[in-house]
Amino acid sequence: MDMPSMSDHSKHVGCLLDLYMFITIALALTLGGFVFVLLLSLDVLFDHPTRIRMLKLFDLLPERERFSWQQVFRRALRAVRPPTFLDAWAQQKQMHWAGFLLSVDEFRAFWWLAIIFGIGVGILVMAINEWRGVSLAVALMLMLAIAGSPYLYLHWRIRRRVRDIAKSLPDFMDLLTFTVQAGLGFTPALQRVCARYPGPLGEDLRRVLKQLELGFSRAEALDEFVSRSPSPEIQNFVEAVKLTEQLGTSLARTLGIQAKMMRLTRRQRAQAAAQTAPIRIIPALVFFFLPSLLLIYLAPPIINFFMRR
């Protein structure tokens, strides 16, 4: 009987290595897709327009068939006890700034579960690849990406919410100015404008109106409004309203001046961002455009050189 040759054995080992690499890549892509879908589902849970559409969809179901996945999800998070080192990285004011319905304890619990999941994925990837050097680097990158995704998502939500508020505040102030000029006071004008005003700014202002209905003073409700958003435009708007109330000046004129100043500030920011555009293009040119251009120009002579040999 003929013994298997060394070439057959090397081919068999190569096939096994290719199979391991295929399984590792497939597992990494699957787990990455799972994390992406999980973050997307969180955005669906916390995004107000999407949540309203989902509630309208659930209203089509009979009463006995309704089921709140959000309550189940939050109840499961309350059962988790995260470590104390996460307290310095996630605070309650950041939950308000991001517009989350989750409390800070629930967010810390979700973050702790993401860290455990990331560590498990890293260990699994390293075990499949037999603890090689490349697998260690890939596993470390997956662990950092999965464990840090809740923190990055939180700050991305804060930046997006601040940007949306700063973009919609001048238009809101114009509407409020026209309503005040029509003869309404500040609170009735705010009720008229905020009744159907979309976006995070409308949500926060409707909460201000609810606080006024519950007996809060105007100053207290506006201070709570400032605490729910880190936007400097909101602080300027509230300070202008308070100063107008103290000095007895024209509220419509003050709001009009504030709207013009905010539009000027937004225009200056856009101009500054446009001036930095050439610098931002450099990484894309160096890492994507130039390699493809070199490949197009150098590939034919390189191929001809090796073919002639």
Image: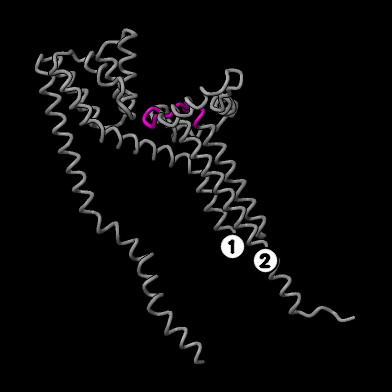
Pointer 1: what residue? 133
The kind of secondary structure element at disc 1 is helix
Q: Which residues are drawn in magenta?
A: 96-107
**Residue 194 magenta-highlighted:** no
Callout 1 amino acid: Gly
Chosen colour scheme: one colour
Asked if residue 183 lies left or right of residue 221, the reply is left
In percent of width and height, residue 167 lies at 25, 36
Residue occupying the far right of the picture: 1
Pointer 2: what residue? 17
Quarter residue 262 falls in: top left
Q: Nearer the viewer, mark 1 or mark 2?
A: 2
Look at the image and tell me in which quarter the N terminus lies.
Answer: bottom right
In percent of width and height, residue 199 lies at 33, 30
Compared to 47, does 189 lie above or below? above
Answer whether labels 1 and 2 touch (C-beta < 8 Å).
no
Q: How crowded is mark 1: few (under 14 residues within 10 Å), some or many (20 or more)?
A: few
